[in-house]
Image: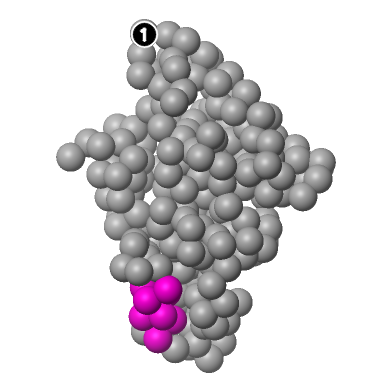
Amino acid sequence: MRESLTTTAPAARFGIGGPVGSGKTALVERLIPALLERGVDLAVITNDLVTAEDAERLRRSGLIDPERVSAVEAGACPHTIIREDPTLNIEAADALERRFPGVELILLESGGDNLASTFSLDLTDFWIFVIDVSGGDDIPRKRGPGVLKADALVINKTDLAPHVGVDLARMEEEACAVRGGRPVLMTDCRHGHGIDALVELIETRVLFRR
């Protein structure tokens, strides 16, 4: 178990993983104002191979103090630094806690990876895996480790379902089936649908506010 270097409780660390283009950064952009509105003291870490593009996007967004956004460059497969050796991410999170005493929650967005991407339990307290409907409604049936092992599965871009021939109800049903009833959330970041349910999950299952 992580130990705090201060007298304050350590921040909860919330992982956000998923394939390239599934909408992880867009989801973070929706979560930031929703969490801040509920009084959550927040910071963010983004992961990418050799750039800080996602971090710069968040810093320029005006949604959060740019100093509260850190970038980690993997320099290898994206899953390496969230699973096999999460040292760089752990160090980045520890640095944010030292810089902002009292921070309650750190969002850790992974670099885009495949359906096998998972987070080390040494790094996160809770993590979600994000897929999107444009990837096909057969993704849950493929039973990738990310889909099966995540604390919660997010099916994103639900607004695209009629445009890509996806049976959304069937996709949700099959996702719930392969996950044995563990949380499956449907989101549409473009219009903000489903974000409140995810924030509620964070408040109850991660921050234990109620």
Judge whether residue 172 is colored magenta.
yes
Q: Disc 1 residue type?
A: Thr
Q: Is residue 111 left or right of residue 137?
A: right
Indicate whether 84 appears above or below 141.
above
* Residue located 29% across and 32% down the image: 39
Q: Which residues are magenta?
A: 170-178
Q: How is the image coloured?
A: one colour
| Residue 79, above or below 35 | below
Instruction: Give the dominant element type of the magenta stretch: helix, strand or loop.
Output: helix
Question: As drawn, is 131 to the left or to the right of 83?
Answer: left
Question: Which residue appears at 68% of the width and 30% of the height?
Answer: 88
Mark 1: give few (<14), some (14-19) or many (20+) Cα within 10 Å: few
Residue at 46% x, 23% y is 2
Q: Which residue is mark 1?
A: 7
> Quadrant where the C terminus lies?
top left
Q: How many marks?
A: 1
The quarter of the rendered structure image containing the N terminus is top left
Q: Does 173 appear in magenta?
A: yes
Q: Which is more toward the observer, 18 or 160?
A: 18
Residue shown at the point (43%, 38%) measured from the top left: 125
Is residue 197 visible to the viewer in this orientation of the structure?
A: yes
In the rendered image, the residue lying farthest to the bottom is 165
In this view of the protein, can residue 37 be seen by the observer? no
Q: Is residue 95 above or below residue 184?
A: above
Instruction: Name which quarter of the figure residue 139 lies in.
Output: bottom right
- Where residue 75 sits in the image (x, y, percent)? 81, 41
Which structural element holds mark 1? Answer: loop
Residue 71, x across and y down, in percent: 67, 34
